[in-house]
Image (cartoon, rainbow, N blue to C red):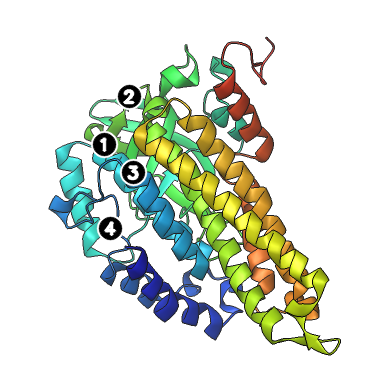
Amino acid sequence: MRETCRRYVDRVLVPFIVADREREWAFDPSMRLAPEVLEEADRAGLRSLGVPDVYGGVALESGREAQTFALIAAELARGDVGIADKLVQNWKISVLLRELASPELQQRWFTRYMADPQFLMAHCLTEPRGASDRWLPYNAPEANMDTRAELVGDHWVIDGRKQFISNGFDASLYVVYANTDDSVGMLQGTSSFLVPRDTPGLEVTRCNETIGGRYMNNGEIAFDNCRVPADHLLAHNDALGKAGIYFRPGKILQAAKNLGIGIAAFDDTVEFVHNRVQGGRVLIQHQAVAVRVAEMATKLEAVAALLRQAARAVDLRRPNADALADMAKVFASHEILEVCVQAMELHGGYGAMLEVGIEKYLRDASVYLHMDATTDISHFRIVKALFPSTAGNYAGTT
């Protein structure tokens, strides 16, 4: 699988990125990504990870799913992390649907997904208010989601707004979380629903223009009297607990994509310092340069080692899996950003030039400081996992 992905990255993805480095800055989101990029990913089997093989998906070895996802996500992100983001969202949601959706829903939506290489999915959790409450989680009624769903006859009626949604601008199918019981905390009163893009009352209101990962069109979605058939309910009142199927591998994938950025930055830097002459010798022969390259390599190996350990813990469902997954995500976000800073500095003035591509790594890596929870919130989660009986609440009045 990794070799297949590597061929796709080297033959399709990298040439697409290098051919036009200004393309990602098009402010018409529909004009950024050429259709053939996802079509070639589909041909390589890279869209269908997590889809049950009965629908034509790629079967993954039981007990190694997170590890497989990590290997392939890192390789994809070496080509471009925004495109990796697009595909990774599909993988995670495919697993969620595989585990939670009824056979009828799976038949309907996996069939449509597999038939269209441009079909994307989005996971709608974050709202304009209180995003960190969801990650802690702060389990109290006052922290419940503002998006609400009410059963009216044979339909659920959804009202609210979601923001910072990966694939949100482009998706054909959304997994939407909403408050369905005001009297309890969000862990007991949140439900999830499958909502097709063409559902009346669903409006994609904007594409968020991010500094990095720009080939994944992050979006905002509004729901106004959005009526969803009752059978499109995925999880009733315990959706956040069941979403661990999505969240836990998600941290692994965040760290893996980040690692892929660092590997690309390192590879380009190694090539540069072995060919650029400064002060009468190639750069790698200068001690100051050699020290920086060694530090970059060490950081990459450290991130990769923790990532492997965390992915294995998730696959084996070990008690420390949650803490390790958060550790890998946070550690990667800081170490890879530093790798990209070093890459930019070692390229001198070329590091800031759009046409060279080094500045892109720095932009892409900077986004990961706050994706899937900020660094501080992730630290709180780590401490809560390590010391559940003594750690503070970190939110609320008690």
Residue 84 visible in rendering = yes
Q: Which residue is mark 2?
A: 236
The x, y position of residue 163, in whole percent, is 55, 45
* Front-most of residues 136 and 297: 297
The x, y position of residue 282, in whole percent, is 75, 85
Q: CA distance from mark 4 to mark 1?
A: 15 Å
Q: Which residue is mark 3?
A: 195
Compare marks 4 and 1 and give the one earlier in the sequence.
4
Q: Which residue is mark 4?
A: 48
Name the kind of residue labelled 3 in the image: Val
Check contact, mark 4 vs mark 3: CB within 8 A: no
Name the kind of residue labelled 4 in the image: Ser
| Furthest residue toward right | 279
Q: CA distance from mark 1 to mark 3?
A: 17 Å
* Front-most of residues 336 and 102: 336
Q: Answer with left or right where residue 2 lies relative to residue 349.
A: left
**Residue count near mark 2 (Cα–Cα under 10 Å), binned few <14, some 14–19, many ≥20:** some
Q: Answer with left or right where residue 31 lies relative to residue 196.
A: right
Disc 2, SS: loop
Name the kind of residue labelled 2 in the image: His
Disc 4, SS: loop
Q: CA distance from mark 2 to mark 4?
A: 27 Å
